[in-house]
């Protein structure tokens, strides 16, 4: 005789306990009503703030209506996994070392998509062992999902003025993943906003991408420019990028709530290949095979070698003028990629303009 199914409240409690056993720091459960967030998304798209990320518009309401994406969905289980490596919180110190490349802290270790997806699938399997077959689908930044809105409704944190999710006891250095399900689980209380009058994230943004509280124009965001943008980086934004070659963490690093962030205990998120403080000229010398080898299992690989060189060329252009930096750039001046050649030419011109002995003024 089979054992009786647990009551929804008991099942929700078990799910959260299993999630913690699997390495998630917090789990929450919400329904699928995202009407307010849908309206915000539609305004954001109408203003063109998504830039080249046309898929944000292409999926229509499937992003904000979970049951349209996965029919039968009535609840979403949202899970949080912290990723800040130990000793990697001195963001601004690294930004003051212009010959060193800055990589967003989330990308220093193993690709989070793989880590979280595997753990969420294990959680779904554990639920199935307890209740039998049920409808579900696992997501980790892999489909049209309003993950931040779902996290806020599930009580994992509120969406801050920089558009990242913030938790009062953990800051914002965490990944999110979801399980869409047909299980009628009890709901958690939504998180409340605690940004107050603070605007540090708005004021610190190097390119002014946070155009208003809770409004980010991706076209100006360094994370977008270095990761999502496929073509040339707008020239007027290049000087503001400094030595940021993959992503940007300024708005998180300056946030007062991140003083409560706890370093991750996940070995998968530990820095690899010395990318926590790499020397720019050494990175620029990587040929494609070395790039692919060094970024195996890393989210950085997705941008490809050409955009990697594009980003580093900009950082080298912003570095203090030196014969060594100019020589490194000259070595790529005839690169087969027009994209790379154009950014190298800009960097060489900026090196000359930054050199006091040249008599030129930096642009």
Image: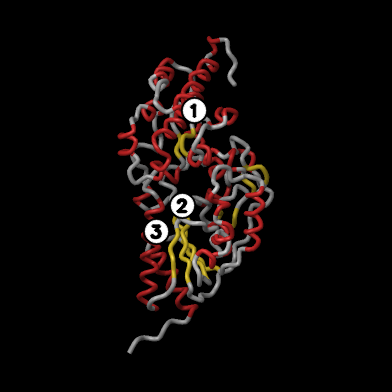
Measure how far apart labels 1 and 3 are at the Cα level.
34 Å
- Residue 175 spot, x, y in % from top left: 47, 54
Q: Is residue 40 left or right of residue 81?
A: right
Q: Quadrant of the C terminus?
A: top right
Which residue bears the numbered disc 1? 314
Check whether the beta carbons of the residues at disc 1 and disc 2 lie within 8 A of each other. Answer: no
Occupied quadrant, residue 356:
top right
Which residue bears the numbered disc 3? 117
Q: Which label's residue is closer to the chain start, 3 or 2?
A: 3
Measure how far apart labels 1 and 2 are at the Cα level.
33 Å
Question: Closer to us: mark 1 or mark 2?
Answer: 1
- Residue 342 spot, x, y in % from top left: 49, 25
172 versus 321 height, above or below: below
Residue 9 disc label: none
Residue that lies at the very extreme toward the bottom in this rendered image: 1
Occupied quadrant, residue 287:
top left
Residue 262 disc label: 2
- Residue 269 spot, x, y in % from top left: 38, 49
213 versus 117 height, above or below: above
Q: Which label's residue is closer to the chain start, 1 or 2?
A: 2
Measure how far apart labels 3 and 2 are at the Cα level.
22 Å
Mark 1 Cα-neighbour bin, 10 Å: few <14, some 14–19, many ≥20: many
Mark 3 Cα-neighbour bin, 10 Å: few <14, some 14–19, many ≥20: some
Q: Quadrant of the N terminus?
A: bottom left
- Residue 113 spot, x, y in % from top left: 41, 53
Q: Which label's residue is closer to the chain start, 1 or 3?
A: 3
């Amino acid at each position: 005789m089979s054992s009786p199914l647990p009551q929804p409240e008991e099942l929700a409690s078990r799910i959260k306990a299993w999630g913690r056993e699997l390495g998630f720091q917090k789990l929450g459960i919400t329904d699928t009503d995202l009407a307010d967030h849908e309206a915000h998304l539609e305004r954001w798209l109408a203003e063109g703030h998504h830039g080249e990320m046309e898929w944000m518009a292409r999926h229509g309401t499937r992003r904000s209506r979970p049951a349209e994406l996965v029919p039968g969905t009535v609840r979403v289980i949202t899970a949080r996994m912290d990723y800040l490596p130990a000793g990697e919180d001195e963001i601004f110190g690294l930004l003051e070392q212009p010959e060193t490349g800055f990589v967003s802290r989330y990308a220093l270790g193993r690709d989070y998509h793989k880590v979280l997806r595997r753990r969420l699938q294990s959680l779904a399997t554990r639920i199935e062992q307890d209740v039998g077959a049920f409808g579900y689908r696992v997501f980790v930044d892999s489909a049209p999902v309003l993950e931040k809105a779902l996290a806020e409704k599930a009580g994992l944190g509120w969406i801050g003025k920089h558009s990242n999710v913030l938790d009062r006891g953990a800051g914002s250095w965490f990944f999110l993943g979801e399980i869409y399900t047909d299980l009628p689980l009890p709901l958690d209380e939504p998180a409340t906003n605690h940004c107050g009058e603070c605007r540090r994230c708005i004021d610190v943004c190097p390119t002014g991408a946070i155009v208003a509280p809770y409004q980010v124009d991706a076209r100006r965001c360094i994370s977008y420019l270095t990761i999502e943008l496929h073509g040339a980086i707008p020239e007027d934004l290049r000087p503001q990028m400094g030595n940021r070659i993959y992503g940007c963490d300024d708005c998180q690093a300056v946030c007062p709530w991140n003083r409560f962030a706890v370093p991750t205990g996940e070995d998968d998120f530990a820095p690899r290949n010395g990318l926590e403080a790499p020397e720019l000229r050494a990175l620029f010398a990587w040929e494609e095979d070395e790039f692919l080898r060094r970024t195996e299992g890393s989210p950085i690989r997705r941008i490809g070698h050409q955009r990697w060189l594009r980003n580093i060329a900009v950082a080298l252009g912003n570095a203090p003028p030196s014969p060594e930096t100019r020589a490194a750039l000259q070595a790529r001046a005839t690169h087969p990629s027009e994209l790379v050649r154009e950014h190298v030419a800009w960097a060489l011109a900026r090196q000359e303009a930054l050199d006091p002995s040249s008599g030129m003024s930096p642009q």
